[in-house]
Image: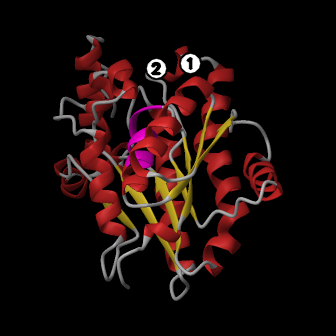
Amino acid sequence: MSKIDYHHQTVIVTGASSGLGAEFARQLARRGANLVLVARRADRLESLAAELTRAHGVTVTTIARDLGAPDAGRTLRAELESRGIHATGLVNNAGFGTHDAFTNEDPDRLQNMIALNISALVDLSRAYIDPLTTADTGILINVASLLGFQPIPYMSVYAATKAFVLSFTEGLWEETRGTNLRVLAVNPGAMQTEFFDAAGQTADLGTKRATPEQVVTIALDTLDRRSAPPSVVTNSRSLTLLGRLLTRRHMVRVIGWMARRAQNKPAAPAHS
């Protein structure tokens, strides 16, 4: 495969108001792509759109929307196409996580997390899989996480949603092989973003944080490779290697110990 010519791309980026989503938007615009930016915070979207249009001369459309609502993908596609906007690329970046013992979690908050991290991502992917597959060069990037490679006590639901995204995306990679669609699951480790500032060491496991710029650069460069893999770990790769060396029993206990230490929680009782 040749490198992607982004001057002929219109890419939807979800969760584009800050962090990794905003950086995807900046680097895609720098490469010449027109954009559709989707997030809840309209003021941030408008500010970013003005910045990108001014700097790169691309067309940027903003959609202020909560993607956690049912039928998010189909509704978004219908609205955009009614306005004459036909996307050739999709970056599913929107998502959030919580960090606490499962027994302390708000059930409504957990449902909202699953709706956004999984349901919206699947619905958006399904809504656009056909046009992306038939485009001259289609792009589908789903943001998973390094935390999806193993259970993460005290972030159990969030890590499980990212495990789903990783497995789902790698399956799509195989299903669409031989078409014009390029599919990639991006698995960042700890990053310098609002999410990790809030989650702290529970999420970064004490590892060095990468910048969003570093993560997005690796993701887009990977997508340009002649034989791109179904997924890429952008930073903190040593944690995935640890998972290969330890049994699952020992891996989850090590991660649990690290999480409790970060939160100054008492040690867990011994299991037989």
Mark 1: which amino acid? Glu
Q: Is residue 120 left or right of residue 100?
A: right
Image quarter of residue 117: top right
Residue extent of the magenta highlight: 18-26
Mark 2: which amino acid? Ala
Q: Quadrant of the C terminus?
A: top left
Asked whether 262 or 209 is in front, the reply is 209
Do the residues under discs 1 and 2 have CB atoms within 8 angstroms? yes
Which element type, helix, strand or loop, lies under badge 2? loop
- Please name the predominant secondary structure of the magenta segment in the image: helix
Asked whether 263 or 113 is in front, the reply is 113
* Residue at image location 79% in from the left, 54% down from the top: 83
Which residue is label 1 attached to?
Answer: 105
* Residue at image location 50% in from the left, 53% down from the top: 58
Across and down, in percent, residue 137 comes to 52, 77
User: Alpha-carbon neighbours of circle 1 within 10 Å: few (<14), some, or many (≥20)?
Assistant: some
| Residue at the far bottom in the pictured view | 178
Across and down, in percent, residue 182 comes to 48, 73
- The label shown at residue 101 is 2
- Does the magenta-highlighted stretch encompass residue 2? no
User: Alpha-carbon neighbours of circle 2 within 10 Å: few (<14), some, or many (≥20)?
Assistant: few
Image vertical order of residue 85 relative to residue 170, above or below: above
Q: CA distance from mark 1 to mark 2?
A: 7 Å
Instruction: Using the rendered image of the protein, determine whether residue 236 is visible from the camera's viewpoint.
Output: yes
Asked whether 134 or 56 is in front, the reply is 56
Colouring method of the image: secondary structure
- The label shown at residue 154 is none
* Residue at image location 49% in from the left, 55% down from the top: 142
